[in-house]
Amino acid sequence: MEHLKLALLTAGFSQSLLVAAMLVSFARSSAEPRFYLGVFVGLYGSTFLAEIIAMTGILGAVPGLAVPLMIAPMFLGPLLYLYIIKVVNRDGQLAAPINRQHFIAPSIGAFVASGLLLVPSEAFGRFITEDVGPTAPIDLLVMLMLVVVLLTTFIITLVYIIKGYALLNKNSASIRDEFSNLDRKRLRWLKFSLVNIALLWVAAMAADWTDISDTPAGFITLIVWELASFYVIAVLGLRQGVIFGPQTTPPAPVSPTPPGDRLGALELVETPLDIRHEAEQKYTKSGLTQEDMDRIAAKIRQAVHVDAIYRNSDLSLTQLSKFIGVQAPYVSQTLTQKIGSTFYDFIAQARVRAAMDMLADPDNADSVLSIALTVGFNTKSTFNAAFKRVSGSTPTEWRRSHGANRNSAAG
C-alpha cells in the first residue's frame, strides 16, 4: 500500500508540474491569463510533494521543508482569482498594483508561517512527523501556529473562490451586451472548476481529519480526482482566451438578406423591467437625446437588416460600432433604451429571422446546421435555442409547417 501511495503521489506531482509547464509555456508573457493558471497548478502540486517528503523520511530529517510547502497553498486563491480577472478584463491586461494588492493577505500569512522556522528543529520535526499530542509548551506553540496557518489558508482560498464566482456571474450578465455568440465566453467550465476545487479542498481536509485518506479507496479517489481536475483545467485553460480586449476590424457588408414580410409581426422580446431600470441608471449622465438614438437606431437596423452584418459569427458590439461609425457606449445605450434589447438578443433575432426565410424557401434544401452557420450561429444547439425562443417552434417544425413538402436530410 505504501508503494502504491508513493507512486500515485509521484505521478500527481509530476503531472501537476507538466500541466503547469504547458500553461506557462503557452503564455507569451506573464501578462497573459495562462501564466497565472500555470503558476496556480504548479503550486497546487506542492501538496503532493509535502506527502512525498513525509513518506520518504525527508521531512523528519529536514523539518524546515514543511514551512514553504505550507505557505504555497495560501497563494492558490489569489492566483486563480487573478486568472479570472485577466480572462474577463475588457482590455486583457492587469495592472501591477492589482497584482500586489491580492498578494497582501497570503504574504502576511506566509510571514506568520515563517515563524515556525524559529522553532527548534527537533521539537518541530517530532511534532509534525509523529502522531503524538503536545506535551511541552513549545508543542502548544507549534500547534497554535499550525492552526493559524491552516485557517488562514482556508479563509483566503474560500474568499477568493467566492469573489471569482461572483466575477464570473457578472461576466455572464455583461457579455450579452457585447457579443453575438456566447460560446466559450460564458466560462461555465471555469465556474465548474471553482466549485470542483472548493469541494476537492474540503474533501481532502475531511479525509485527513477522519483518516479516510489512509484507506486505499479513499486515497486513490482523491489522487484521481486531483489529476482529472488538473487535466480539465489544462485543456480548457489552453483553449480559453480573453473575453474582452482589442477587436478586429469591422466586417465588410455581405449580400443583404432582409427578413420576409410574413415575419414583420415578430417583435423583440422586451428587456425585463429590472434590467431596463438598471440601464436607465447606467446611462443617466449620457448626453444622447432621443433624436440621437433615433439616428443611431436607424444605422443599426441598416447594418443588421440590410447589410446583413449578422452573418459574421464573431460579430461584437465593438465591430458594429466601428461599422456604423458610432461609439460603442452609444450603440449599447440605443439598443437598450431605444430598441429595447441586448446586443446578443438583437443579433440573434436577426439571424433567426433570416433562417426562417431560408427554411420556408421551397428551393432551399440546405440542412438546419448549414443554415445555422450561414446566418452566423456557431453551433446547432445555440441556433435551436434561439429559434425556439423567437418563433415558438423548432427549425424542423418551422420548415415542415412553412416550407413545401419535400424529402430532405434537413433535420
Image (cartoon, rainbow, N blue to C red):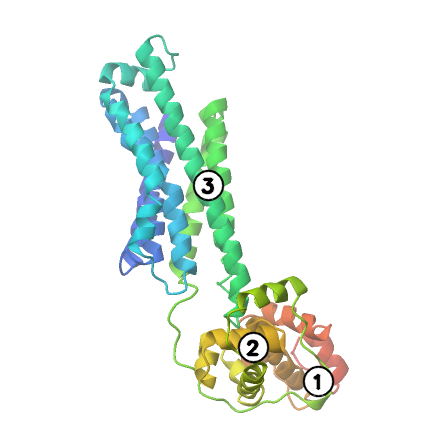
Q: Position of residue 291 (x, y in %)?
A: 57, 85
Q: Earlier in the sequence, mark 2 or mark 3?
A: 3
Tally of numbered tags: 3
Amino acid under disc 1: Leu
Element carrying mark 2:
helix
Q: Position of residue 114 (x, y in %)?
A: 27, 28
Distance of label 3 from label 1 (alpha carbons): 50 Å
Look at discs 1 and 2 and give the one toward the viewer.
2
Amino acid under disc 2: Thr
In the rendered image, which residue does mark 2 sit on?
334
Element carrying mark 1:
helix
Element carrying mark 3:
helix
Q: Earlier in the sequence, mark 1 or mark 2?
A: 1
From this viewpoint, is residue 314 visible? no
Q: Earlier in the sequence, mark 3 or mark 1?
A: 3
Q: Which mark is residue 328?
A: none
Distance of label 1 from label 2 (alpha carbons): 23 Å
In the rendered image, which residue does mark 1 sit on?
263
Q: Which mark is residue 159?
A: 3
Q: Are marks 1 and 2 in contact (CB under 8 Å)?
A: no
Tag 1: Cα neighbours inside 10 Å, few (<14), some, or many (≥20)?
A: few
Amino acid under disc 3: Val
Near-viewer residue (123 or 396): 123
Q: Position of residue 99 (x, y in %)?
A: 32, 50
Which residue occupies 33% across, 10% down? 137
Q: Are marks 3 and 1 in contact (CB under 8 Å)?
A: no
Which residue occupies 60% across, 74% down? 337
Look at discs 3 and 1 and give the one toward the viewer.
3
User: Which image quadrant for residue 228?
Assistant: top left
